[in-house]
């Protein structure tokens, strides 16, 4: 086995974002590009000598090639045991589970999450640290610094590892172990939800559809829902991971999971519908005739989680990202547990989970999770819903309506303006920051601004402050508009506008989202001059 050193070009790029480095596939295919970034990660992992590393990806185009590169480089960089998912597959939550279970120093996860794949699609590399969650900014900043000065990388010149067969291979001083991608994750799920109760639900004739959107969750959902819980074959659709996700956006929302939406809103809807994203950390929940917003789903899970064995002791608290609706806060207040509001991105939840301050957390972008790992977990959320449905023995849409009746309804929508010019997006945010002090008391779209700020987060555990996380505008009419720029796009800038309005009166819980939110939408458009700055008359996607 020879150890090879090869010169690399300096890394010609900007800092990796909140979810690692995401770029178009041809960018990653440039000579030494992957090697540079991976070596920079390994150089930043100080205690890698003799440590365990987890490696896997969501199966998108270029996954297998990069897995081979990572394995050979990891073996040459001092790791002694490298666990890789069979066929190179690991969902993000499964990787988090493995890192924690096998006390790995971290994991390399290859994914661009919900972004499309294929030769012209997106690719991504992220690193999760020893608690199983995304690397903190101090780590990713150090990786970026390293990419700027790196001149060599270490690798083994060896033939490719067979990823299809379970087993061990020696490479230099390291053991590479191809493991079952699903087994450890399934075992963890079994400790959290009542498999027998859910199996009995399926025996009773309950029917669901799980749309894996041709992404990584297919094998997990098939093994657990159909294999272990006895759901009929065919419950999981699009269950085979494809390099281009069948040409679709593996993004579980009403726009991209439209087949599932059509089924659930149509006359032949089964009892429950769910979908997951490219890397399996997001979930979409649809009741018969009713899309459940991720914000509502978090609130409903918070209200009923104690029905599942893993949460029978009750919850320590709940955390939501700032743009997520305040529905979960209302449940927390009623339960007498703590509620936290964090910046967007899962890494902010990790400190709260580690400190035992919260048990559940979630984001409006379809991420829900708990203290079982340090990532959001799509299939886990679906299983927790199933456990609750099995206990309450009520239709899913009834559970949602009863929740609104008890707590009020938070109407919610997100408007995305994708691929706008970065200078235009920056100008809009600068405009908002400039007018902020003058907004209170002003009226837009018939709504009066009560308070507004540029959200800054002080971590309750370590006291660190993260400023400029988005503009929050609160209206006297119990409505809210939030503006922020995406940190995960790969082309231009994406402006996200989050709209919500609270409605306590059950007689007004059947409005269309559009009607309920039209005044907030108008207020947001007017005060931020969205049309003027973006040059767009309508959002690209509404979810
Ligand atoms: C988006 C979502 C955010 C999520 C992030 C990563 O970020 O809004 O809630 O945490 O994606 O999710 P942004 O910066 O584009 O708004 V995933 O499923 O890509 O790991
Ligand atoms: Co994802």
Image (spheres, helix red, strand yellow):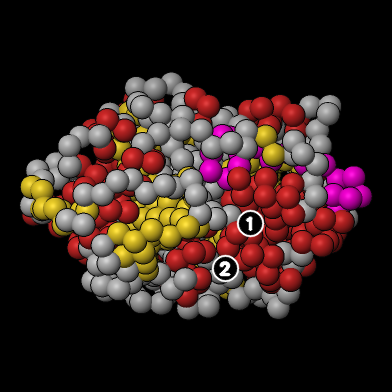
Q: Residues within 10 Å of mark 2 (few under 14, many from 20)?
A: many
Q: Which of the labelled discs sits on residue 220, or is there none?
A: none
165 left or right, relative to 234: left
Q: Disc 2 vs disc 1: Cβ atoms closer than 8 Å? A: yes
Q: Mark 1 = which residue?
A: 380
For marks 2 and 1, give the CA distance.
Answer: 10 Å
Percent x, y for residue 393?
A: 88, 55
Q: Secondary structure at mark 2?
A: loop
User: Relative to the observer, which residue lies in front, 422 or 301?
Assistant: 301
Q: Nearer the viewer, residue 297 or 456?
A: 297
Q: Considering only order in the chain, which callout, 1 or 2, is on the residue closer to the N terminus? A: 2
Relative to the observer, which residue lies in front, 311 or 127? Answer: 127
Per the image, is 211 magenta?
A: yes
| The C terminus: image quadrant | top right
Question: Quarter of the image holding residue 316?
Answer: bottom right
Q: Position of residue 357 (x, y in %)?
A: 53, 76
How crowded pointer 1 is (Cα within 10 Å; few <14, some 14-19, many 20+) is rated as many
Vertical side of 273 occupied by 192: above or below: below
Q: Specify start and end residues of the magenta stretch as a single range.
A: 201-218
User: Quick one: which residue is furthest to the right in this view?
Assistant: 204
Residue 372: mark: 2
């Amino acid at each position: 086995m020879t150890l090879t050193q090869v010169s690399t070009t300096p890394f010609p790029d900007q800092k990796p974002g909140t979810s690692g480095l995401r770029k178009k596939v041809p960018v990653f295919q440039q000579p030494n590009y992957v090697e540079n970034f991976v070596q920079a990660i390994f150089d930043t992992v100080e205690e890698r000598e003799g440590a365990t590393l987890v490696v896997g990806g969501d199966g998108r185009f270029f996954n297998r090639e990069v897995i081979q590169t990572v394995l050979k480089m990891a073996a040459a960089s001092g790791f002694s045991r490298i666990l890789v998912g069979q066929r190179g597959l690991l969902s993000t939550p499964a990787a988090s589970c493995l890192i924690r279970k096998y006390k790995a120093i971290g994991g390399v996860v290859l994914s661009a999450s919900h972004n499309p794949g294929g030769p012209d699609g997106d690719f991504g590399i992220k690193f999760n640290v020893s608690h199983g969650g995304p690397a903190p900014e101090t780590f990713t900043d150090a990786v970026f610094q390293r990419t700027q000065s790196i001149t060599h990388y270490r690798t083994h010149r060896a033939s490719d590892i067979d990823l299809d067969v379970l087993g061990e291979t020696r490479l230099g001083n390291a053991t590479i172990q191809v493991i079952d991608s699903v087994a450890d994750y399934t075992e963890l799920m079994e400790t959290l939800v009542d498999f027998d109760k859910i199996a009995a639900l399926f025996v009773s004739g309950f029917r669901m559809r799980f749309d894996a959107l041709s992404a990584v969750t297919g094998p997990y959902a098939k093994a657990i829902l159909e294999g272990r819980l006895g759901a009929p074959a065919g419950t999981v659709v699009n269950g085979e991971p494809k390099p281009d996700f069948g040409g679709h956006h593996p993004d579980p929302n009403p726009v991209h999971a439209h087949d599932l939406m059509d089924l659930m809103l149509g006359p032949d809807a089964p009892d429950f519908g769910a979908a997951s994203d490219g890397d399996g950390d997001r979930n979409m929940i649809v009741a018969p005739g009713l899309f459940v917003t991720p914000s509502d789903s978090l609130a409903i899970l918070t209200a009923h989680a104690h029905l599942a064995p893993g949460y029978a002791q009750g919850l320590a608290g709940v955390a939501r990202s700032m743009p997520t609706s305040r529905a979960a806060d209302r449940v927390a207040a009623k339960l007498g547990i703590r509620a936290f509001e964090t910046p967007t991105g899962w890494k902010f939840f990790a400190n709260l989970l580690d400190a035992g301050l919260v048990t559940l957390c979630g984001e409006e972008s379809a991420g829900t999770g708990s203290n079982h790992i340090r990532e959001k977990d799509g299939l886990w959320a679906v299983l927790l819903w199933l456990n609750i449905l099995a206990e309450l023995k009520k239709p899913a849409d009834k559970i949602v309506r009863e929740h609104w009746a008890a707590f009020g309804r938070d109407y919610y929508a997100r408007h995305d303006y994708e691929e706008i010019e970065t200078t235009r997006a920056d100008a809009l945010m600068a405009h908002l920051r400039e007018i902020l002090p003058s907004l209170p008391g002003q009226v837009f779209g018939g709504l009066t601004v009560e308070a507004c700020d540029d959200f800054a987060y002080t971590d309750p555990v370590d006291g660190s402050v993260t400023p400029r996380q988005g503009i929050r505008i609160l209206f006297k009419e119990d409505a809210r508009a939030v503006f922020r720029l995406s940190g995960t796009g790969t082309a231009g800038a994406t402006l996200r506008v989050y709209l919500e309005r609270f409605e306590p009166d059950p007689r007004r819980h059947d409005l269309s989202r559009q009607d309920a939110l039209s005044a907030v939408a108008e207020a947001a458009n007017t005060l931020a001059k969205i049309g003027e700055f973006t040059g767009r008359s309508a959002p690209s996607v509404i979810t």
